[in-house]
Image: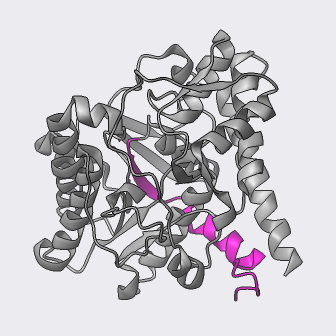
Amino acid sequence: MSGESGLPSHKSATRLTEFYRGKTIVVTGHTGFKGAWLSVLLAKWGARVIGISLPAESDNSRALFEPPVSDSTELDIRDRDAVLKAMQGYKPELVFHLAAQSLVGRSIEQPMETLATNIMGTAHVIDAACRTPTVRCVVNVTSDKCYLNAGSGRAFSEDDALGGADPYSASKACAEIVTYAWRKAVRQAEFPLIATARAGNVIGGGDWAQWRIVPDIVRAVRSGQSVVLRRPSATRPWQHVLNPLYGYLLLMQALYRLDPDIEDAWNFGPDRGDVLKVSEFTRRVLDRWGRGDWIVHSEAPAFPESELLELDSAKSHKRLAWKPLFALDRGIDLTVDWYRRVLDNTESAIDVTVGQIAAFEKLATMEVHKT
């Protein structure tokens, strides 16, 4: 039973870790930012984690953060036969699909790659899961950018229209539609059950991507340069990576219980107080670091990004008993601490990551005990 805060009881939280223990789980995109954190967490809980992904990008710092998977296959999800062979060979029970081309800027430079990966790649993963008898549930992680954003400033709920003004956003809207179509018309058997998860502007250690604010800040501060912001007045729903991952894990567990109403789309966004302008978020990170400044560069890439973006996560709060456990300031503290420890060679990336996961688990228990 949940307490008044909506959090699961300590016994329920314990059951979540027990639920994953011993299960064979495919994580596509396990070499990416969120996929690596999810893989570490699942391995910590005793799952047999199978990674399906392209190789980690060549950045030497990123290569430090290799998740401890039981087995892995390097493949491109645009290769339908390779995806099917891997899925049927590993015989997983659960699939978290996170593999994607995840950058708006790159999607404008390489629109066909983005559309092929995020639309057809998603179709290949879902089709392979449906053709693998052992697969019981699939969580397809899309993005908060999947909504048709007219700049109204209203928080998006799961029933709002899908769309996108750039190839990345459009591809994620299409990935949602593809998932819905498979669930409603293509899937031939009772399983797998399939749901989608929408979250964005996730921060945390181990992100080295181009055109993302935290890696940009880290690179600028360490090189003694100013952070270049494209849209300092744009608002975004910022949150630490462990918050939405906790939601994805609860969602998968709920799917496994065979509740047909769970086969749906789900938002996992921060509390309203953590929806900040890019400039304010940057200031908080720099304050925590203790140095640095930011500028707006007239020649910086001007992507067609929305000024306003916020998610309504009421359904996840009510139906899944989920809430963001790390407030943004705590998430910023942990993120800065991660980069400092790893880049200063005081601690390994995996050890810092495991330690922060343990702090998250402890916080969950403490919050429950307050109810």
Q: Residue at x 70, y 48 (%)?
A: 357
The quadrant of the picture occupied by the C terminus is bottom right
Looking at the image, residue 214 sits to the left or right of residue 119; the answer is right
- Which of the 4 quarters of the picture holds residue 356? top right
Place of residue 87 in the rendered image (x, y in percent of width and height, measured from the top left): 26, 50
Q: Residue at x 53, y 53 (%)?
A: 236
Is residue 73 visible to the viewer in this orientation of the structure? no
Residue 101: % across, % down: 31, 39
Tell me the residue at 37%/27% (across/down). 301
In the image, residue 365 above or below residue 212: below
Residue 311 in the figure: left or right of residue 50: right
Q: Is residue 367 highlighted in magenta?
A: no
Q: Is residue 9 magenta?
A: yes
Q: Is residue 79 shown to the viewer in this render?
A: yes
Residue 211 spot, x, y in % from top left: 44, 30
Applied colour scheme: one colour
Q: Quadrant of the N terminus?
A: bottom right
In the image, the segment drawn in magenta is: 1-29
- Dividing the picture into quarters, in which one does residue 233 lie? top right
Q: x and y percent of residue 136 in the render?
A: 34, 70
Closer to us: 177 or 35: 177
Q: Is residue 184 left or right of residue 15?
A: left
Question: Eyeballing the image, is 215 above or below 30?
Answer: above
> Number of callouts in the render?
0
Question: Residue lying furthest front in this view?
Answer: 298
